[in-house]
Amino acid sequence: FTMKKIIFITIILFLCTSSLLAKVKQERCGGTYAYTYSGSISYDEARTKAIENAIVMALADKFGTTVTSQSLLELTNRGDRFDQMSRLQVKGKLVRHINAPVVSEPVYADNMFTLNVTVDFYATPIEYAPVEFVAKTLRNGTSDRYESSEYVAGDRFAMSFCSPKAGYMAAFFEDCNTVVCILPYIGDDDMPFRVGKDKRHIFFENDENGYQMTCGEEPEINYLHVVFSPNPFINADLMRTMTRKKFNHWLEKHLNYDPDLQVQTLMIRVLPDKEQ
């Protein structure tokens, strides 16, 4: 009886260990990516940014991102995929480098510098629940016929949301390296916004809680991160304004805590108003 018990326990431990190993399976990622920058930043700064971006690009190529396929297609077609991909929510995480990143000497052409970056590392996938809700960015209107990912400075921004499940949601607007929690509305900080099953919600539709797009002299690309779960996710550590790094940390913690948490990123392009 004792020997059978020992064998049984050994088998259980082996199965548990195998299960844990399967969950943390590492995959090899890498590639060579070209990074273009102006002379307004130093070489060391450009080199650091180029390596960070190349890692994100390799993760995105291997595991994908939370950005909608249409937004990603628009981004790729415009030819600025490298710079903007570094700000997307990728579905993978670097574990360790196999070989140190290799950065070429800068090549100068057409008033811009280009670095070629080669990365080679192990990574693990980040599991996101499949997105079941439908979120749309709206321009100067509140019905879905006003759906648009492109705005002109001065346009009014709104968002529609509908989920086949009742639950809770939050929305975050990313501009450059700053992420701002725009939903729940200011003053409603206790928990994420409660949404009903199969109910179409409209957000930011009036002057009290609405937003008007602004832009400098050049077109800008921003992101709207929409987070939903059928479970109320803990909100005590949520800051209204945070760096992208802190937002990623916050999101990763909640993804680990709640396997039902869904994340979708919508790309927003804002153009300057030529008439101003």
Image: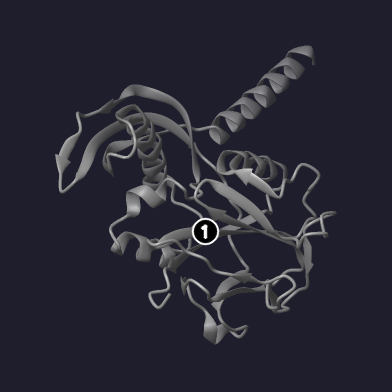
Residue 207, position as x, y percentages in the image:
71, 76
Q: Is residue 118 above or below residue 152?
A: above
Q: Is residue 1 above or below residue 127?
A: above
Is 246 or 133 nearer to us in this picture?
246
Residue 124, position as x, y percentages in the image:
49, 36
Task: Determine the residue positioned at 55% across, 32% down.
Answer: 24
Task: Determine the residue positioned at 54% across, 43% down.
Answer: 126
The number of numbered badges drawn on the structure is 1
Q: Is residue 14 above or below residue 111?
A: above
**Residue farthest right in this picture:** 190
Q: Amino acid at mark 1?
A: Tyr
Task: Using residue 196 as the reference point, say whether residue 82 is left or right of it.
Answer: left
Callout 1 environment at 10 Å: few (<14), some (14 to 19), or many (20+)?
A: many
Q: Is residue 214 above or below residue 118?
A: below
Task: Using residue 71 as the reference point, say whether residue 32 is left or right of it.
Answer: left
Is 152 or 11 nearer to us in this picture?
152
Q: Quadrant of the N terminus?
A: top right
Assign a secondary structure to mark 1. Answer: strand
Task: Using residue 38 as the reference point, say whether residue 62 is left or right of it.
Answer: right
| Residue at which label 1 appears | 223
Task: Using residue 59 as the reference point, say whether residue 146 is left or right of it.
Answer: right
Residue 67, position as x, y percentages in the image:
48, 58
Task: Determine the residue positioned at 39% across, 24% down.
Answer: 97
Q: Quadrant of the C terminus?
A: bottom left
Is 160 or 162 nearer to us in this picture?
160
Task: Determine the residue positioned at 67% across, 23% down.
Answer: 13
Residue 201, position as x, y percentages in the image:
71, 76
